Image (cartoon, coloured by chain):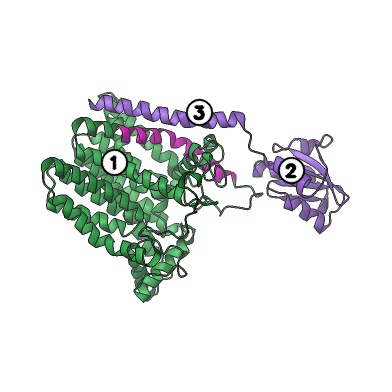
Chain colours: A green, B purple
């Protein structure tokens, strides 16, 4: 056991160094919506109000992270430090690390005796390129994911034992704060509330559900009400949705992804732009929009440096097995949860499903010509359930014995080692 | 249902989904060819610039370009355009042409290696730039 703890501690420590290094070295302006994020944080921190649509392009994003980032910026500017955005990037890195720790804790909570499962879940989360990239950005995504997964963990703990009002309060607070950071946490909140309600109906105890809904409503309700009053919709976005019918907004290629094989040939913009599966896959495992370690996207006639393309092709190949395992894991968890009537396990695949549905509706509702509404980081809330599911499949299907454990360990090391040149800035 | 059975079913279902996506991709790539950069350039020169475009038979350097090559006449100036697919190949094409000391007749821009028969004017160069993809 001490050896296992050492191993887990080592993985977490390495991840911490990686994320901090990247956050320190990543040009904050390369991150998604970086300048608009800066303007938002500036308004919140200095004027103590929300920005108008003309003041920041991301006015539709909830304000929690911007308040923290703006506060940190004011503090560092007051100290005369020349990199006022860096602390917010380090906050994103800390949140990314918290996601990894929470993935391990969640796996341990559900299967305390399966150490292999816990380790696979931890490594798959830590070695996820989408998480590593988001953790370096001046962006709220990882904070929202950490808070949401924290809420998920509290809910799972409650469901494993016996959900109490305290469970509802804790999960509601964390999920409410996550929803006050990014809208992508709302599907998690809905999924957890649904599972708690089903459990409550089974046990005839409504306290936990009511507590969750009440606390979450206190956290995120005012924001949603403000959006309704100021912009006409609680989930208003920074562009108007087309007036055509929902299913007519995207061509068939969006749903089918006919250029899927190009992810192994040229997985960068503008190839398979607005094709859902290949674009998301290439962006999750690589860097479809070229915002990571490469020069900005060149004019069409220019050539990308060979190393940029080859690194991303390698990432696409590396991603095949973990992607299949993650999908298999979510399906397996759903089957196990259904057969055991375990809401503690079932909340994981339900969360992933809720996030996927919300994302699909968003992507169809707001089509864009440049493909900027199809970002893998939007799906990060589903990373931990998928990693735990993959860990479950690997641990259950591997033959018993020391040799298979070593093989799994070697594969995890290989996964990290092969990706290292891409993941380390 | 045992954990093992659930995991197996999960793997099978995941493989079916991944396989279906690959089948869609394979079927598309067998039945459709996205136009190459050379094809896009050819279409642009013909349709937007109204030029007559032909293949290159007498230039072994251009013929060796893996992205293909074409020849046309822009405002009275004959030009051979070759398309490289990597920085290394473009450097190789440039080096082979430079052995003949072409001077300003050789124009390398991104993946496009362009050799003019005589020194081109700004307008002639711009016509080829307009059709670069």
User: Are discs 2 and 1 located on one and the same chain?
Assistant: no
Closer to the camera in the image, B26 or A419: B26
Query: Is A326 included in the stretch rendered in magenta?
Result: yes
Distance between mark 2 and mark 3 Cα atoms: 31 Å
Q: Is residue A226 above or below residue A350?
A: below
Neighbour tally class for label 3: few under 14, some 14-19, many 20 plus, Cα within 10 Å: some
- Please indicate whether residue A89 sits to the left or right of residue A159 in the image: right
The numbered disc on residue A156 is none
Locate residue A35, reporting x and y percent: 47, 64
Q: Can you identify the residue that label 1 sits on?
A: A350
Task: Name the chain under label 1.
Answer: A
Q: Is residue A400 above or below residue B44?
A: above
- Please indicate whether residue B58 sits to the left or right of residue A9 in the image: right
Nearer-N-terminus badge (2/3): 3
Q: In the structure shown, which secondary structural element does the residue marked by tag 1 occupy?
A: helix
Q: Can you identify the residue that label 3 sits on?
A: B23
- Please indicate whether residue B94 sits to the left or right of residue A61 in the image: right
Q: Residues at badges 2 and 1 in contact (C-beta under 8 Å)?
A: no
Neighbour tally class for label 2: few under 14, some 14-19, many 20 plus, Cα within 10 Å: some
Task: Name the chain under label 2.
Answer: B
Q: In the structure shown, which secondary structural element does the residue marked by tag 3 occupy?
A: helix
Locate residue A237, reporting x and y percent: 43, 58
Report whether residue A425 is seen: no
User: Are discs 2 and 3 located on one and the same chain?
Assistant: yes
């Amino acid at each position: 056991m001490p050896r296992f703890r050492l191993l887990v501690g080592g993985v977490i420590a390495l991840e911490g160094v990686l994320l901090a290094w990247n956050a320190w070295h990543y040009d904050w302006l390369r991150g998604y919506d970086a300048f608009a994020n800066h303007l938002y944080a500036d308004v919140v921190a200095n004027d103590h109000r929300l920005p108008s649509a003309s003041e920041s392009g991301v006015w539709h994003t909830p304000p929690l992270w911007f308040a923290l980032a703006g506060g940190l910026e004011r503090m560092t500017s007051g100290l005369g430090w020349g990199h006022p955005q860096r602390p917010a990037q380090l906050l994103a890195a800390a949140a990314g690390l918290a996601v990894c720790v929470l993935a391990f804790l969640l796996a341990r909570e559900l299967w305390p005796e399966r150490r292999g499962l816990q380790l696979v879940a931890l490594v798959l989360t830590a070695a996820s390129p989408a998480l590593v990239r988001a953790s370096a950005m001046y962006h709220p995504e990882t904070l929202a994911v950490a808070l949401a997964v924290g809420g998920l963990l509290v809910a799972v703990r409650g469901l494993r034992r016996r959900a109490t009002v305290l469970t509802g309060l804790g999960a509601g607070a964390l999920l409410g704060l996550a929803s006050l950071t990014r809208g992508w946490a709302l599907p998690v909140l809905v999924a957890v509330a649904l599972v708690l309600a089903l459990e409550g109906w089974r046990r005839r105890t409504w306290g936990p559900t009511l507590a969750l809904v009440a606390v979450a409503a206190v956290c995120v309700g005012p924001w949603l009400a403000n959006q309704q009053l100021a912009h006409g919709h609680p989930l208003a976005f920074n562009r108007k949705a087309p007036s055509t019918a929902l299913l007519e907004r995207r061509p068939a290629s969006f749903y089918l992804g006919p250029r899927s094989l190009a992810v192994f040939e040229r997985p960068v913009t503008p190839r398979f732009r607005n094709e859902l599966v290949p674009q998301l896959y290439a962006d999750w495992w690589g860097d479809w929009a070229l915002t990571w370690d490469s020069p900005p996207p060149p004019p069409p006639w220019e050539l990308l440096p060979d190393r940029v393309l080859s690194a991303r092709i390698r990432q696409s190949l590396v991603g095949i097995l973990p992607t299949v395992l993650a999908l298999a894991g979510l399906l397996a968890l759903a089957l196990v949860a259904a057969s055991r009537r375990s809401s503690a396990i079932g909340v994981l695949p339900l969360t992933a499903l809720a996030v996927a549905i919300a994302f699909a509706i968003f992507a169809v509702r707001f089509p864009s010509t440049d493909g900027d509404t199809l970002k893998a980081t939007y799906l990060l809330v589903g990373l931990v359930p998928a990693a735990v599911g993959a860990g479950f499949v690997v641990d259950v299907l591997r033959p018993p014995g020391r040799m298979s454990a070593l093989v799994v360990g070697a594969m995890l090391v290989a996964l990290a080692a092969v990706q290292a040149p891409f993941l380390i800035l | 249902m045992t954990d093992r059975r659930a995991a197996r079913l999960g793997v099978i279902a995941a493989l079916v989904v991944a396989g279906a996506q690959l089948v869609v991709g394979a079927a598309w790539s067998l039945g459709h060819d996205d136009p190459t950069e050379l094809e896009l350039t050819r279409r642009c020169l013909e349709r937007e610039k109204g030029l007559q475009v032909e293949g290159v038979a007498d230039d072994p350097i251009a013929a060796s370009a893996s992205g293909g090559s074409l020849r046309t006449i822009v405002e009275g100036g004959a030009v051979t355009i070759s398309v490289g697919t990597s920085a290394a190949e473009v450097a190789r094409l440039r080096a082979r042409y430079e052995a003949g000391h072409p001077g300003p007749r050789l124009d390398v821009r991104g993946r496009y290696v362009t050799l003019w028969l005589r020194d081109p004017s700004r307008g002639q160069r711009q016509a080829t730039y307009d059709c670069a993809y």
